[in-house]
Amino acid sequence: MATTRLGTGGPPTVSRLGLGCMGMSGMYGASSEAESIATIHAALDAGINLIDTGDFYGMGHNETLIGKALQGRRDQALLSVKFGALRDPAGGWAGADGRPASVRNFLAYTLQRLGTDHVDIYRMARLDPSVPIEDTIGAIADLVKAGYVRHIGLSEVGVETIKRAQAVHPIADLQIEYSLISRGPEAGIFPVLHALGIGVTAYGVLSRGLLAGSRPTGPTDLRQHLPRFSGDNLARNQKLAGVLQQIASGLNATASQVAIAWVLAQGRSRGVDMVALVGSRTRSQLDESLGALQVALGADDLQRIEAALPAEAVAGTRYDAYQMGHLDSEA
């Protein structure tokens, strides 16, 4: 497994692929606990050490699941945990809470569910506009001093927030959606990360399965509510996925593998330590994702892929209007 340092203020040895576990807690429809745990074990066996979760995934279910999977194997994993996203009883979005007292409270429950005495990277899922970022980062910094957190990360924030956070405590990485058709961070955010020595944990590298030709499976599938998977948008975007599949066939790879390989190549070309999170829910999906590490994309390949799938060709935003309004990274 190829590794990287995740920013100058982060863990020194991180696998280039990380395992995103959100889908194991019902966000994309039904899932199997036994298969989820087997997939986490297979990822560790393959050399993936970054395991990413959020305390609000499945209302704590995801952390409990990972805790079971890591029994006896905690030392093989770097746990990246997001906090602060609030839910209502129906599972709806209810904002974000970055108050220092809340930060400590969130972590206390996280440690209990994961069955560990520390997390390796702790980050707020979305910026709380009512709390200065300095206060939130300062609270996590106190937890670093106390030994409960090893490194501090950020999630879906913009340039000014990144700079203000870095001034309080070294930031390991920014977690942000990034793929062939979600390229917003390239113009303003990536250059700042490069200058500050902050890494990137890219999620949504398959645009939630869109680039792999996947589509919503039922009413509990999160993608039912995402504009890119709705009506005419889905039909237009499936044509883009078809183009990628044609290119991938010529490279003796799958569309998923090429999409992941493209993201990893961008880290090298843009001078940022980049890890691609793959949201594999099964061992077969994980095996396919691991194959991306064997796909070597030359300069000509990259140009051809980007010309065939220009970011402006995608139909629909990555979240609905309400959630887009809560993304500091899109401000």
Image: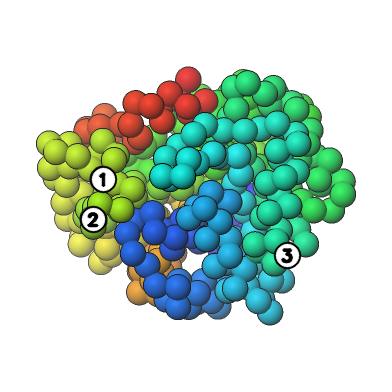
| Viewer-nearest residue: 239 or 325 | 325
Along the polypeptide, which appears first: circle 3 or circle 2? Answer: 3
Q: Are marks 2 and 1 in contact (CB under 8 Å)?
A: yes
The residue tagged 1 is 224
Looking at the image, residue 88 sits to the left or right of residue 259; the answer is right
Question: What's under tag 2, amino acid-wise?
Answer: Gly
The amino acid beneath tag 1 is: Gln
Quadrant of the rendered image containing residue 23: bottom left
* Residue 172 located left or right of residue 64: right
Say the numbered circle drawn on residue 215.
Answer: none
* Residue 165 visible in the snapshot: no
x, y percentage for residue 81?
62, 51
Spatial CA distance of label 2 from label 1 is 8 Å
Mark 1 residue crowding within 10 angstroms, few (<14) / some (14–19) / many (20+): some
Quadrant of the snapshot with the N terminus? bottom right
Q: Nearer the viewer, mark 3 or mark 2?
A: 2
Instruction: Point out residue 113 in the picture as x, y percentages from the top left corner.
Output: 65, 62
Point out residue 117 in the picture as x, y percentages from the top left corner. Answer: 78, 62
Residue 195 appears left or right of 183: right
Residue type highlighted by circle 3: Thr
Q: Which residue is at 71% across, 71% downward?
A: 75
Mark 3 highlights which residue?
116
> Does 150 sit above or below residue 133?
below
Q: Which residue is mark 2?
A: 218
Give the Cα separation between the discs numbered 3 and 2.
35 Å
Please give the name of the residue rendered at 80% of the width and 53% of the height, measured from the top-left corner.
Answer: 148
Sooner in the amino-acid sequence: mark 1 or mark 3: 3
Q: Is residue 132 visible?
A: yes
